[in-house]
Image (tube, rainbow, N blue to C red):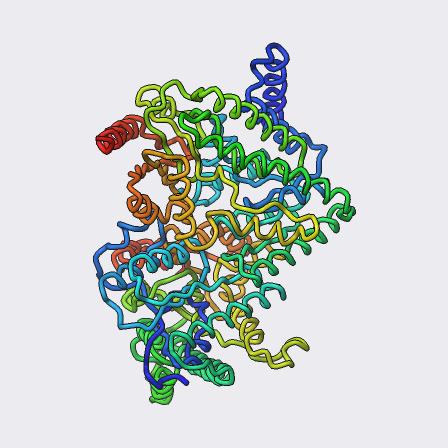
Amino acid sequence: MIKDYFNDLVSGIEDKMAHDPKNRTPRKVYALEVARLGQRLYGGNDRVAWCGVAAPFDLLTAMGVTSCFVEFVGAMLASTGMAPAFMEEAERAGFAGDICAYHRSVMGAAQKNMMPIPDFLIATSCPCSGGLAIMENLAKEFEKDLFVLNIPQEASPEGVRYLADQMRDMVAFVADQTGEPLKDDALMEIIKQTNRARQLMADVYALAQSVPSPANSMTLSNLGIVMALLLGSPQGVEVAQAYYDDFSEKVARGISGAKNEQFRLLWIQNRIQYKNPLIPFLENELGAVIVADELNSITWDPIDPQDPYTGFAKRAISIPFNGWGARRISHLKKMAKDYKVDGAINPCHWGCRQGTGMRGLIADGFKEIGVPTLNLEVDCVDSRNFAEGQLKTRLEAFTEIMEARRG
Amino acid sequence: MAEKNSLKIGFTCANTPLPIIEAAGFSPHRILPMGDCPDLSGQHLHDNLCPHVKKSLDAALSGDMPDIAGMCFMNSCDAMRRMADAWRALRPDDPLLLLDLPTTTDSRSISFFADELRRMAKALAKWSGAPFDESAVKTCASRFNTLCGVMKSVSEKYRSRRLEGGAARIQELRNMASTQSTIKSLAALEEIDCQPLSDPPEYDSADPDAPVPVFLFGNAMPDPKAFELFESCGIHIVGDDLCTGSRMFQPISLEPETEEDETGDIYLTLARGIMRRPPCARTFSAQNPGAIADDILSGAKACGARAVMGHILKFCDPYLDRLPMIRNRMKEQSVPLLLLEGDCTLRSVGQQGTRIEAFVEMLR
């Protein structure tokens, strides 16, 4: 079923692009590559590794492994409306309704044989304890070998060395699993592609800060976190290049990505993954455009080909969800200033202790720089309790606050 | 050494390296999630964080804790990390440490945790204004191990129903030993250990009122009255693996295991000793996923329990996410299992009374 979904998605996007070159928007290029990734994961021909969010996906690509964080499946199931059935399956199996819905839907899918059986799994201790526990569950469910990367909280010399050494161990583990060692030329090639995509994405995010922004509320949705899966590949560079070309042209010509950019918003953490009317309502009826997403940022230096594991380690440690909350708050405040936003929206994904847990502290941080925050109560994957009317009312009230602050 | 100035270092996790705190001349004080402090943490942390964290923070914000010279947090789970964030923001004058605790116990992780212990020693020396005495670490760890031994001896007396006060008394002693220096706790426990034993109640094996021996696992439940309540429902806790229970008082092995240990790196030895103690759900084995269920099963068998009871705090991902594995394992082995969800209040335990009684009825 899911394999067919991805096949249909790929052929549909390819047809549209072939039919009219104007359809080759950056979002379509991105969607096509995401769909192709889904095809590879579900196709049955590739070596597959289910991973934690902070895994070095480009390094796994260099070793001939198609890898993906499991939350991707949760998001995909939500976007297609299939997640609730799988969550019910997980709840029947004893997974509490209070745990993250990304993880519940993944466990339900695994139990219904809707997750491809991986060759092995790579768990990461960042971003969350729940994600780590789910990887342990999946390893048991699939009876496949599990490798754990402990991501230190700080980029201290000891922490970086510890993670870099673990990544070397991971390479040995993968080689053991696949029977193929990492080749130097493959490593150098993915580093080249990763650094190229990294630079393009940094430029894309800088362009997105323009007023008006070349992005509308959906252009950059989920981009940063999913781009991690495409790093190290020519496809990753292609997606980044498509965004760069589009944004460069729009900024040069002063074209706004949205029809009516009255208010600029920063979206905290993840988007709501199922179909919902909030974003169109915000943009079309309230003139509030999401120009920035927390995860759309480059927090790491280019990978040094002479010392790649140190670079991969520093990159994983630099994720804003890692370490002290104060670091994340500083990062958010900087984004708010760089993107010149009028307000921030925190969906407060239910079940997310690491992210939602500090919502009060985040709101306090924004208050210090005069940016109002709207804390919603939304489950970003579980649509069963979605309260459209209440949420719309709160968005309207928030827009009024932003308007009043302008005087 | 400990006791020289009785300054306290607060902590909230059973994995906290107490010998380092004591070797630095401080007295460890666990902030226990109990009491009736108003909910102040809710303004800063989301409602979906575990009550262990929120109630500990409530105690701190309400001033329901002694003066401290600093706090030592463990990065044991998301909620603990968020509590450290909130503490830093809301009690900015408290010096803070957040120690990274790897989730696996391989040699690289132990070595990294040893570096964290070195960092901790340096920070504590700065807080105390005195150089850190590395030679005191082994003495403090040995004393802690002696304390664990005496605690085990007293617990055995409870198990054989010869300790006045039952399970509630044991929990009071554990709370006492969590909130003062090892020297003081040891003196108090040794005195209790030497006291004459009460006669155990005699039950015929067919006696329908005989308490049912149960193994209790889970996270934090420090209120002694909760244990009274458990017992009043007809269970006898013959073994436990709770964060505020026996897990807190597991000895730290100081035996050298590698040539590196022979070099006398006390931080490495201590790191290994701490990380190799029986873990809570947040630490696991990549080579043996689901081992937590085996550990609970063997814990139950070792103490002769007829059933297993889990008391899990709401929103505790490390446990909640692993409950299906635990449930399946118990089912495979035909071990009766009762799972309770709590919030560190007596009220929540009280609401479960009927379920516990029904469970006991089923077992009798």
Please give the name of the residue rendered at 40% of the width and 43% of the height, measured from the top-left corner.
A334
Residue A390 vs residue B6, the one in the foreground: B6
Is B224 positioned to the left or the right of A39 in the image?
A: left
Residue A18 vs residue B256, the one in the foreground: A18
Is B144 positioned to the left or the right of B177 in the image?
A: right
What percent of the width, then of the height, locates residue B255?
59, 80
What percent of the width, then of the height, locates residue B111?
59, 68
Quadrant assignment, res B90: bottom left
What percent of the width, then of the height, locates residue B249?
44, 74
Is A404 positioned to the left or the right of A270 in the image?
A: left
Quadrant assignment, res B75: bottom left
Residue B122 vs residue B306, the one in the foreground: B122
- State the quadrant of the N terminus of chain B: bottom left
Residue A236 higher or lower than B230, as above or below:
above
- State the quadrant of the C terminus of chain B: bottom left
What percent of the width, then of the height, locates residue B35?
24, 64
Is B220 positioned to the left or the right of B291 in the image?
A: left
Report the residue that reaches farthest toward the top.
A19
Residue A116 higher or lower than B77, as above or below:
above
Please give the name of the residue rendered at 61% of the width and 48% of the height, measured from the top-left corner.
A122
